[in-house]
Image (cartoon, grey):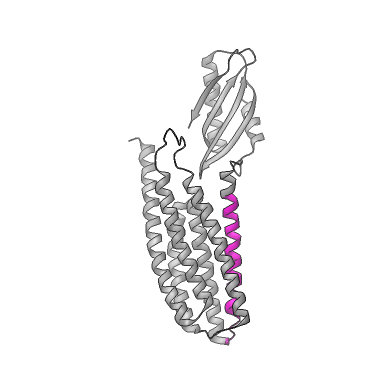
Amino acid sequence: MTSYTFARWRSQNRTQMTLTMAFSITIAMAVIETVGGILSNSLALIGDAGHMFMDSFALGLSLFAFEVAQKPATPSRTYGYRRAEILAALVNGIVLILVAIYIFYEAYSRFIKMPEIRGSLMLIVALVGFFVNLIVLSLLKKVGHDNLNIKGAFLHVLGDTMSSIGVIIAALAISFTGVKLVDPLMSLIIGGIILRGAIGLVTESGRVLLEATPKGINVIDIINETKKIEGVRDLHDLHVWTITSGLHAMSGHLLIEDQMVSKASEILAKVSEILRKKFGIAHVTIQVECEKCEDPFICKLEA
């Protein structure tokens, strides 16, 4: 096992363990908040509990997708199952949107008819939920990096953390002022925060699935940088896309001056280095052409 392979395996194993821990902690807290919400009759707390159950679902889905994504490529799936993580992120984003809509609906119902709320119990449970969310957030932040799948789970928990803060504020306001209207008002704010993050997650997942050019990469810059290499005339039919989080791919036709094959190999090596270092593109397929070549030849580069 090479040092790179070992480091990758260790990173994957650490991510899997972290997701498992986060899932276990979150599902336990969701049960506690549900009971607390029912006993205190707080919509904000029940909504927070519902969001925690969604967090559990998101973390479970992320864990499942992460395991599936590690499966090797096959003749029928040449990229393997790496897009499973993107699909999980998309599902998580859609679920978050539904959660936000539900919170809006329940808040509207409470504006019409406001029940009694036990602010002290609501506050205690919300404080516990807040600290639990901080623990889960810290776990996910250590392994999240640029992984869209884990980012989806992270956004779930981040939204729930904001929700817990909202519940704490609402509980304090109810306990000291007796104004119950703050409960559904805070729920609307929480729903808005969740909805904003969810739309961003769905949009980003959609970009990957539609094979749009990754954010932060400009194809014109790639062409200009490549043409600076001695012997390169042009780069055309260029396509750049994302296979999965953190893994970008590119294909294109490289027009070079008529020269020996060994020299063309040197040019390809330089192109590969620029693409990897300046643009973070590790999976590259280039068809090399020259004006006097009868048949272009294809060279695949993988960094």
Residue 146 in view (yes/no): no
Q: Main secondary structure of the magenta part?
A: helix
**Total labels drawn:** 0
Taking the spot 45% from the left edge, 42% from the top edge, the residue there is 81
Quarter of the rendering containing residue 131 = bottom left
Between 21 and 111, the one lying in front of the other is 111
Taking the spot 48% from the left edge, 63% from the top edge, the residue there is 54
Between 82 and 21, the one lying in front of the other is 82
Which region of the structure is painted magenta?
177-204
Vertical side of 271 occupied by 37: above or below: below
Taking the spot 61% from the left edge, 60% from the top edge, the residue there is 196
Vertical side of 268 occupied by 121: above or below: below
Query: Residue 232: x percent and y percent?
Result: 62, 22
Residue 13 is a magenta residue = no
Residue 144 is left or right of residue 205, and the answer is left
Query: Residue 105: x percent and y percent?
Result: 60, 71
Query: Residue 106: x percent and y percent?
Result: 57, 74
Residue 179 is a magenta residue = yes
Q: In which quarter of the image is the N terminus?
A: top left
Taking the spot 64% from the left edge, 38% from the top edge, the residue there is 218
